[in-house]
Image (spheres, rainbow, N blue to C red):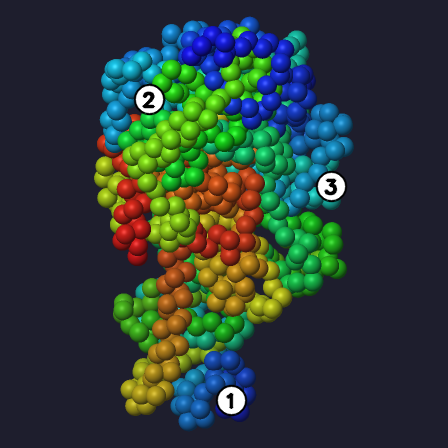
């Protein structure tokens, strides 16, 4: 690529929707712009032999030249021979780790002379998400619906969400457990990002999604995307759709599940399921939490803490007379029928975005696409 | 009790209204009206069965005596309700509860041996009587099961 | 807790939003022991501005809060027409309710709410009403009873069936005569009693046998153990009362009361938002599904 075709154009605003091309090394410029703007950059990095989302500072922290091999209950990292920056699928972490943290103090009370004072003030971090996939953006959009679009807004989610910057990546390497295409949410990011990136051989094709996104390109040497890049990207992403590891037939899932609450498949799957909660922990849309009130030894200072919970927790649902779902069978049924059926009644769209994490991270390899296929096939 | 008055009373009762005159007469023949004051025992737990009762007015409490707990009332019944059916459908040879009046009470008492005989002689009548009894017993069983579950109790620890 | 409890939370961190998870403070004005393990607490907000603004609908609930111990969802059993006097009938059943049982008049308690759906008292105008309660289920129904009494002429025949385990477990016994004075039939029954009891003995759904409801204009409101409500539904349906005219107040454990923690879900319904009051036609697919 000739030097002449790249121009630095600080001060020239890039409109939303504009597609540009940068050299891969210039991604570091975006990182620096984000850092200068006060963002805490979080993105994929290798930790404990998996690609997780942690705070990263440099482009070198990304798992460059790595890919993942996923299957039911199976996850391995393997080296690539092409030095791709984003040549892997999604790992066990999701962005809810940052938007809806696993542990959060909601408020504190403390004695103040003769009285108690309640304090809910807290610092709100400003995150920049690097490498968010279409399934993840769909999950964030769904959690926006849950926490921001109801009669009551969740203020902690809102504060983090409003401050978040999203650099999305269009998947050119879907994994064996992926089925976002079946769920109608990917692999291409259409909206909901500040910048969306498609990795080509030597360059990144970037779509500008917002003014803030455009601002972060100020330090990059960019040129407008040409037909070559646009066609190449479209080709890769079309291929991507065909490379999905799985499909989910979504026709009338609520009807299917509500009509089959006593299907024998639930008993079979209950024999395998350990009720370990992995699926709910890695799911990007699962939102159930526990609320605990704790105090210090004197009882003078107390805190209300919100913690991730799971419907697989044996005491998740109870009444005065006892536990509602004491068996794994009923808890597994609750999770799947909520995720694919009652969620739609509640929020207008499926709770599943087809990311495949629950399949990969289930220690016994339960595959919800298979569960649905079986229930459909043997519909009572 | 003059038969005319008994006829009047029974023919106004919803139990007897739908009956054919022949069946009505057969039941009339084995029925008698008994009046009780408050707190009287119609029959005692452990007594021999010999009557089926239909309440016209008042209230009857069925009590069981439980060693260490005294008398426990397990059911009360009011107008148009039947009790003492074990006389017609014997399971245990004696009464399984004491029937005690709560307030002044009037009942129709049917001689159970005569009732069984009448049903054996006329199977159409027998079918009607036993169909009615079966409905009552089924309803009683259903309610008893709910009582058994002790649904208001707290969690089992 | 006898010290004064002042609230000083800042919402600046949340851009001016009122945080729905933060309780207001209230004083316990009176405690009335109802039965051995159940008491009614009369609460008043300490902040007059809050007391002034607070309103609730019959059937709704508040989250009552003891700092460091936790919260519990308790239905409001007072008169919606008198929101300055908030009554909550609480049975000792766990950590929070156990701690509440040790509170005294004058103590402070946190309150946030009201939450949840209400009894259909407006839709029920010009209808006959049958209210069926089992045990502590009379508490959430009482707010509807007060509303009906306050507007008695808007309702036609009103019958209340009250069931409890034994005579000692009957709630609000001193009020039944008052209710009767408002031309309301009150039928009381217990599951078991000793000889001194001169009332009915038998499960409350069986009390339907004393009634002759007109299915064209009867609405049933019921609250109690789920199995009791199952039998009530059966009796109501047997008398051809339409499914969308039978209302139940359902219960599940609640943590947040605002539809975020997920615990109170019953099929597609969050019992803190779409419930606790739901009509039977909506819950029918799930009611009675084992371990749903």
Residue drawn at point x = 40 percent, y = 71 percent: B136
Q: Which chain carries label 3?
A: C
Q: Do the residues labelled 1 and 2 touch (CB within 8 Å)?
A: no
Q: Mark 2 points at which residue?
A: A88
Q: Out of A354 and B8, give the one closest to the viewer.
A: A354
Image quadrant of residue A18? top right
Image quadrant of residue A121? top right
Query: In the shown orientation, is residue C266 left or right of residue B119?
Result: right
How many residues crowd mark 3 within 10 Å: few (<14), some (14–19), many (20+)?
few
How many residues crowd mark 2 within 10 Å: few (<14), some (14–19), many (20+)?
many
Query: In the shown orientation, is residue A296 left or right of residue C214?
Result: left
Depth check, mark 2 against mark 3: the one in front is 2
Above or below: residue A156 compared with residue A144? above
Quarter holding the N terminus of chain C is top right
Q: SS of the residue at dot 2? A: loop
Percent across and percent down for residue A38 are 56, 8
Q: Residue C198 carries which label?
A: none
Label 1 and label 3 in one chain? no
How many residues crowd mark 1 within 10 Å: few (<14), some (14–19), many (20+)?
some
Q: What is the distance, in whole Å, between disc 1 and disc 3 at their CAs?
A: 56 Å
Q: Out of B150 and C84, give the one closest to the viewer.
A: C84
Query: In the shown orientation, is residue A191 left or right of residue C57?
Result: left
Q: Mark 1 points at which residue?
A: B7
Q: Name the residue under label 3.
A: C82
Q: Which chain carries label 2?
A: A
Q: Out of A81 and C115, give the one closest to the viewer.
A: A81
Q: SS of the residue at dot 3? A: loop
Q: What is the distance, in whole Å, between disc 2 and disc 3 at their CAs?
A: 62 Å
Label 2 and label 3 in one chain? no
Q: Mark 1 lies on which chain?
A: B
């Amino acid at each position: 690529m000739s030097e002449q075709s790249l121009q630095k154009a600080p001060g020239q605003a890039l409109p939303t929707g504009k597609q540009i091309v940068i050299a891969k090394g210039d991604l570091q410029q975006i990182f620096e712009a984000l850092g200068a703007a006060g963002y805490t950059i979080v993105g994929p990095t290798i930790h404990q032999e998996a690609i997780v989302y942690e705070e990263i500072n440099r482009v070198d922290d990304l798992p460059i030249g790595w890919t993942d091999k996923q299957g039911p209950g199976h996850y391995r990292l393997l080296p690539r021979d092409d030095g791709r920056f984003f040549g892997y699928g999604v790992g066990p972490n999701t962005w809810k780790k940052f938007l809806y943290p696993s542990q959060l103090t909601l408020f504190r009370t403390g004695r103040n002379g003769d009285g108690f004072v309640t304090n809910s003030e807290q610092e709100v971090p400003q995150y920049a998400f690097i490498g968010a996939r279409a399934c993840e953006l769909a999950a964030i959009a769904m959690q926006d619906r849950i926490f921001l679009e109801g009669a009551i807004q969740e203020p902690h989610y809102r504060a983090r969400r409003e401050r978040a910057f999203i650099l999305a990546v269009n998947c050119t390497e879907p994994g064996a457990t992926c089925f976002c295409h079946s769920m109608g949410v990917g692999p291409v990011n259409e909206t909901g990002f500040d910048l969306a990136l498609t990795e080509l051989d030597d360059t990144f094709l970037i779509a500008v999604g917002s003014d803030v996104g455009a601002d972060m390109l100020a330090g990059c040497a960019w040129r407008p995307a040409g037909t070559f890049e646009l066609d190449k990207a479209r080709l890769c992403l079309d291929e991507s759709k065909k490379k999905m590891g799985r499909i989910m037939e979504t026709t009338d899932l609520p009807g299917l599940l509500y009509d089959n609450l006593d299907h024998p498949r639930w008993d079979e799957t209950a024999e395998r399921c350990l009720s370990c909660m992995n699926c709910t922990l890695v799911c990007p849309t699962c939102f159930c939490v526990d609320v605990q009130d704790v105090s210090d030894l004197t009882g003078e200072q107390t805190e209300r803490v919100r913690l991730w919970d799971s419907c697989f927790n044996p005491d998740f649902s109870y009444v005065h007379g006892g536990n509602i779902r004491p068996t794994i069978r009923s808890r597994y049924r609750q999770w799947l029928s909520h995720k694919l059926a009652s969620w739609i009644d509640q929020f207008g769209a499926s709770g599943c975005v087809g990311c495949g994490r629950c399949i990969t991270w289930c220690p016994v390899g339960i595959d919800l696409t298979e569960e649905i296929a079986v229930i459909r096939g043997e519909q009572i | 009790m003059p038969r005319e008055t008994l006829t009047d009373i029974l023919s106004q009762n919803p139990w007897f209204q739908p009956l054919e005159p022949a069946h009505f007469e057969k039941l009339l023949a084995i029925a008698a009206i008994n009046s009780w004051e408050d707190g009287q025992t119609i029959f005692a737990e452990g007594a021999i069965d010999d009557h089926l009762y239909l309440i016209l007015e008042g209230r009857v409490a069925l009590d069981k005596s439980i060693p260490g707990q005294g008398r426990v009332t397990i059911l009360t019944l009011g107008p148009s309700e039947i009790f003492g059916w074990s006389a017609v459908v014997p399971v245990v040879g004696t009464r399984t509860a004491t029937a005690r009046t709560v307030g002044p009470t009037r009942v129709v008492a049917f001689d159970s041996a005569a009732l069984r005989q009448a049903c054996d002689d006329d199977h159409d009548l027998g079918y009607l009587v036993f169909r009615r009894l079966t409905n009552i017993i089924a309803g009683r069983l259903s309610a008893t099961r709910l009582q058994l579950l002790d649904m208001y109790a707290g969690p089992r620890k | 807790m006898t010290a004064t409890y002042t609230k000083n939370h800042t919402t600046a961190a949340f851009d001016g939003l009122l945080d729905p998870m933060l309780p207001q403070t209230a004083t316990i004005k009176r405690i009335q022991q109802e039965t051995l393990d159940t008491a009614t607490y009369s609460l008043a907000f300490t902040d007059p501005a809050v007391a002034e603004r607070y309103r609730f609908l019959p059937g709704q609930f508040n989250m009552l809060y003891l700092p460091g111990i936790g919260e519990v969802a308790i239905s409001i059993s007072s008169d919606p027409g008198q929101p300055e006097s908030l009554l909550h009938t609480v049975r000792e059943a766990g950590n929070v309710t156990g701690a509440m049982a040790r509170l005294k008049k004058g103590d402070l308690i946190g309150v946030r709410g009201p939450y949840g759906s209400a009894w259909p008292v407006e839709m029920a105008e010009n209808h006959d009403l049958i209210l069926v309660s089992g045990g502590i289920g009379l508490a959430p129904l009482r707010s509807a009873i007060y509303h009906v009494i306050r507007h008695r002429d808007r309702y036609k025949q009103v019958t209340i069936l009250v069931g409890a385990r034994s005579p000692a477990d009957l709630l609000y016994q001193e009020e039944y005569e008052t209710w009767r004075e408002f031309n309301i039939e009150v039928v009381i029954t217990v599951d078991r009693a000793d000889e001194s009891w001169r009332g009915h003995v038998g499960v409350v759904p069986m009390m339907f046998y004393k009634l002759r409801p007109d299915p064209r204009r009867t609405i049933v409101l019921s609250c109690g153990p789920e199995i009791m409500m199952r039998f009530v539904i059966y009796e109501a349906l047997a008398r051809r009362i339409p499914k969308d005219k039978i209302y139940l107040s359902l219960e599940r454990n609640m943590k947040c009361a605002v539809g975020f923690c997920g615990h109170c879900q019953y099929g597609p319904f969050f019992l803190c938002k779409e419930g606790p009051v739901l009509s039977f036609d909506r819950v029918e697919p799930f009611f009675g599904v084992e371990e749903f």
